Image (spheres, helix red, strand yellow):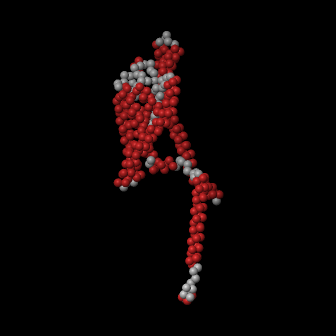
Amino acid sequence: MLQSLASNSCVRLIQNHKSTWYFVSLILGYLLYLIFGAVVFSSVELPYEDQLRQELRTVKKQFLIENECLSEERLERFLKKALDASNYGVSILNNASANWNWDFTSSLFFASTVLSTTGYGHTAPLSDGGKAFCIIYSMIGIPFTLLFLTAVVQRIMVFSTRRPITYIHTHWGLSKQLVAIVHATLLGMLAISCFFLIPAAVFSALEENWNFLESFYFCFISLSTIGLGDYVPGEAANQKFRELYKVGITVYLLLGLIVMLVVLETFCELQQLKQLRKMFYLKKEKPQDRLAILEHDHLSFTTVSENKGAKSEDKTKTFLSVPTLASPNDDPMIQ
């Protein structure tokens, strides 16, 4: 008996706080996914890092042996200076000295990466004034970009998603949920083809040291606004039409970001995903003032109904209390 009562109470507790348990499971699942990613990245990349460290130590040792007049301390200072400059996008190599990081097209590309929060990190402001302006520019520009993207995506969604689904559902008589799923799948495949596969083939042809996988990797990292910065197009030495190339990449990033948001919004409007999201949301509670108003309206409605019922009963009783006549002679009008 006690066991059944305890089990029933546990079941009621789980049912009453179902969204809370779903949310806790979501947090645990996310933490496990983070740990899973850390384990995989560590197991895959750590051997390559160790191999690269050993190769650098070997090259450095061999260089010091061949140049006995140069001390290890002076070499360390030189390498530190070169690496610090490389972190700001300035290379000491002769074949990279012709490329400027802050001409107009490069600055336009940098501004687009800042506003879209991609931030490759290959170029950074050198001066204090540039860093201060970058902070102010981002504080205004990022919300402005979000407003711009929201307005553009909202208008595109009307013509790319909502109207086609409504038209097919109305004129062909198909299920709206089925049409939405098929439409979202086709739209996703079209976006992958036009903004991942085709650009990856183009980048692999234009960039000398990129293969198709590296080009596809750049497209995904860029359009998902991760922006690791390990692959940046247009930075090769003696790049042909570099200014025009940079402008084209800027346009590609902005259009690709808009298309990605349209695809995500299309999938988020699917009924199945809406129901999945609601599992983790808190239930909306009615405010106290609204509850008081509803209770007052209910009491008022009950009082009015009772008064109407009482009046109708009085009318019925009045109608039923008319005396019956045994004969016509009993009628006072006849008398």
> In screen coordinates, is 119 left or right of 204?
right
Residue 263 point in image, percent of width and height: 42, 42
Residue placed most toward the observer, 1 or 316: 316
- Asked whether residue 12 appears in the rendered view, the answer is no
Residue placed most toward the observer, 211 or 104: 104
Q: Height in image: 180 above or below 124?
A: below
Residue placed most toward the observer, 333 or 223: 333
**Residue at 50% in and 47% down:** 277
- Asked whether residue 125 appears in the rendered view, the answer is yes
> Residue lying furthest right in this view?
2
Residue 249 point in image, percent of width and height: 39, 31
Residue 178 point in image, percent of width and height: 40, 51
**Residue at 44% in and 19% down:** 92
> In screen coordinates, is 155 left or right of 128?
left
Residue placed most toward the observer, 194 or 322: 322
Q: Which quarter of the rendering shows the N terminus? A: bottom right
How many marks can you see? 0
Q: Which quarter of the rendering shows the C terminus? A: bottom right
**Residue at 58% in and 82% down:** 323
**Residue at 58% in and 76% down:** 317
Residue 256 point in image, percent of width and height: 40, 37
Q: Height in image: 23 above or below 42?
A: below
